[in-house]
Image (cartoon, helix red, strand yellow):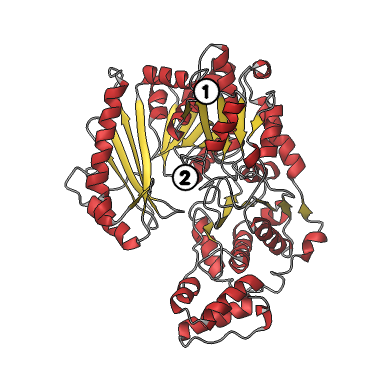
Amino acid sequence: MQGAMNVEFPLVGDAEIDKKVNEWQQWDKNEKTRGDIYSLCLSKDMDKLRKLLLSRLKFGTAGLRGQMGPGYSQMNDLVIIQTAQGLVVYLEETLRDVTHSNGVVIGYDGRHNSRRWAELTAAILLNHNIPVYLFSKLCPTPFVPFTVLHYKCAAGVMVTASHNPKEDNGYKVYWQNGAQIIPPHDKGIQETILKNLHPWDKSWDTSILSTSERLIDPLHEAMDCYMRALARDMLEPELNLSSKIEITYSAMHGVGYPYMVQAFKAANFKPFVAVEEQKEPDADFPTVRFPNPEEKSALDLSIETANMNNSTVILANDPDADRLAVAEKQSEGDNEWYVFSGNELGALLGWWSWYSHRRRNPDENPSQLYMMASTVSSKILKTIAAAEGFNFIETLTGFKWMGNMAAELQGQGKTVLFAFEEAIGFMCGTEVLDKDGVSAAIRVAEMAAFLSNKGMTLKGKLHELFSMYGYHISDNSYFLCYEQPVIERLFGRLRTFSGSPNTPDRKAVLPVSRSSQMITFTFDNGLVATLRTSGTEPKIKYYTELCAPLTEKNLKVIQDTLNEMVTEIISEFLQPDINGLISRSS
C-alpha cells in the first residue's frame, strides 16, 4: 500500500497482535512492508499477522535465511537493522579493539534487497566508528572470508541466500578467523539482537556512506590478491595455456562471471565459452526452476551451449559462486554428458590436491597433512588417507565446522589440503576457509587439462581411483516436509527402531543440535545411511554410500545392491505415503 508511512494502523482486537502491530508501525520505515502489515490489519487476517509478528527469524550458525517479506519472521529492512545492531553490540563486547581498528567486511550477491541490506549494515557499523570494507560491486561469497583474513578484520557479513529460491535472502556472518560463526557466537549474537530490537536513532540513515572516511572498497585489492594466490597454486601453468579442452561456464544468473574471467586469466587458461542467457546477474533466475546447479534441469542451457561450441567440460556455479557443478562429454560425435555428483568431485579434487602437493613437496611427512569431509559425504577421502598416510577428519554437516577445524589445525602448524561436502561444496587449500566455487572451478579445469595431456578424462580418472581404493557409490536425495510434528514423529520412531543403533550406547559421536535432526545407520555390508533435516529448507535428506571391498570390481552388482537398499530405507524408515512426504521429482 502506497502512503502507509503516515497512516494509523487499525487495531485487530487481539492484545498480543495489536501490541506487535503498534511496534511495527513505530519501527518500520519501509513503505512496502509497512503497507503489507497495514493491509493485513485492515482485512483482520489474524492467522497471517500472528505468523508474521509473533515469531521471528532466529539467528543461528547459518546466520539468517528466509523468505523476503513483512514481519519479524521474514527477511526485511527492519529485521536486518535489528540483526546488524545485535552484531555491533556483540562485536564490541567480544572483540572491541580489533573491531574498531581493523573493521568488518561486507559483501552482497545479486538478489533482491542484497545491496540495500549490505548498505544498512555498513551504515550502522560506521555510525559506531567501526571501519567497513564494503564491496562496491556484487561479489562471490568466498571473497568475504578471504578479505576478512587479508585485512585481519573482526568479522565479515555476506548478504546472500546462495542457491535458495528467488523469494529468499540471507545474512551470513564470518568470525575473525575467516570461518563461519559457530557456537557460542551464534547464541551470543542472537541474545544481543533481542536486547537491541528498537532501531537506534541513525539506523535507518545511510547518508554516512557518502561521507565517511572509514568506508573502504576492498574490491580491487581483494581481487588482485585472490587471483595471485590462485596463480601461485597452479602446478603446470604452461600446460593450462596449451590445453585443447574447450570449457563452457555458467554463472546461473549470479555473481560469478567477471570473477571467473579473471580466474581463467590468472591460471593461464584460454577464455571459456559463457552461457549467455545466464551470464549476467538476475534476481529472478528466469531460465531455471531452481538456481541450484545440483538440480537435474539446471544444466540444460549449459549442455546446449557446450554442444554448440564443441566443449567437453562444463563448469557451473550457483548464484553466489560458492558451489560448483561439473559435467563432462562422454564421447566425440554424440551429446551424452555425465554430471558428476558432489561426492565424485570430492574424490577427484581430493586426489588432485594430494597429487599436486606431493609433486611440490615429495619429501614432506604426510602425518602433518589433513583432509576433511562432512559426515554425510563420501568416505572416499578416509579410504585414500588410510592408504597414503595423511590424516582425515569427519565433521558435522556444513562448512562452518570444516572452516573452523581448518583454522584450528593451521594454528597447530598443520597443513589442510582439501575439504568437501557432497552438496558440491569444495575448499581447495586454506586461502578461503569456506567452500569456494571459483577456486574449485580452476582446480577442475587444471586437473582436466593435466589428464587430457595423458589421454585421460575426468570420469576415467574417477574409475581409476575406485579401482585403486575401492568403489564408493552414493545415492543422495530428499523429500519435502512442511510439518514439524511429522518430522519429530518420524525421527522419534527411528531412534527406537528395532534395528541396531549407530552406537552401542545410543550416544551421538558428533556434537548434537536441538534445532536439527540427524541419524546415521551403518550396515554390515559397508552401507552407511544418514537421514537429516535441512537447516535452511523444509527437507528431509537422505545420504547413502556403499563402500565396496577392493575385491569387488563388478560395478553393476554394487549399484544394484545400493539401489535395493535405498528403496527399502525409503520404504521402511521414511515411509513417504504414511508421512505425506513430497518426493524431489514431484
How far from the left and from the top, in percent, is residue 366?
A: 48, 22
Image quadrant where residue 393 sits: top left
Residue pointed to by mark 1: 352
Residue 526 in view here: no
Image position of 316 (left or right of 474): right
Residue sitting at 81 percent across and 60 percent down? 210
Q: Residue furthest left?
A: 498
Residue sitting at 23 percent across and 40 percent down? 568
User: In 3D space, how far apart are the residues under numbered discs 1 and 2 (Cα atoms)?
Assistant: 22 Å
Residue pointed to by mark 2: 398
Q: Secondary structure at mark 1?
A: helix
Residue sitting at 56 percent across and 32 percent down? 304
Image quadrant where residue 442 sits: top right
Q: Nearer the viewer, residue 531 or 176?
A: 531
- Considering only vertical position in the picture, is 353 above or below 513? above
Residue count near mark 2 (Cα–Cα under 10 Å), binned few <14, some 14–19, many ≥20: many
Residue 338 in view here: yes
Q: Amino acid at mark 2?
A: Gly
Image position of 129 (left or right of 41): right
Numbered tag placed on residue 171 in the rendering: none
Q: Amino acid at mark 1?
A: Trp
How far from the left and from the top, in percent, is residue 384?
A: 41, 23
How far from the left and from the top, in percent, is residue 165?
A: 52, 52
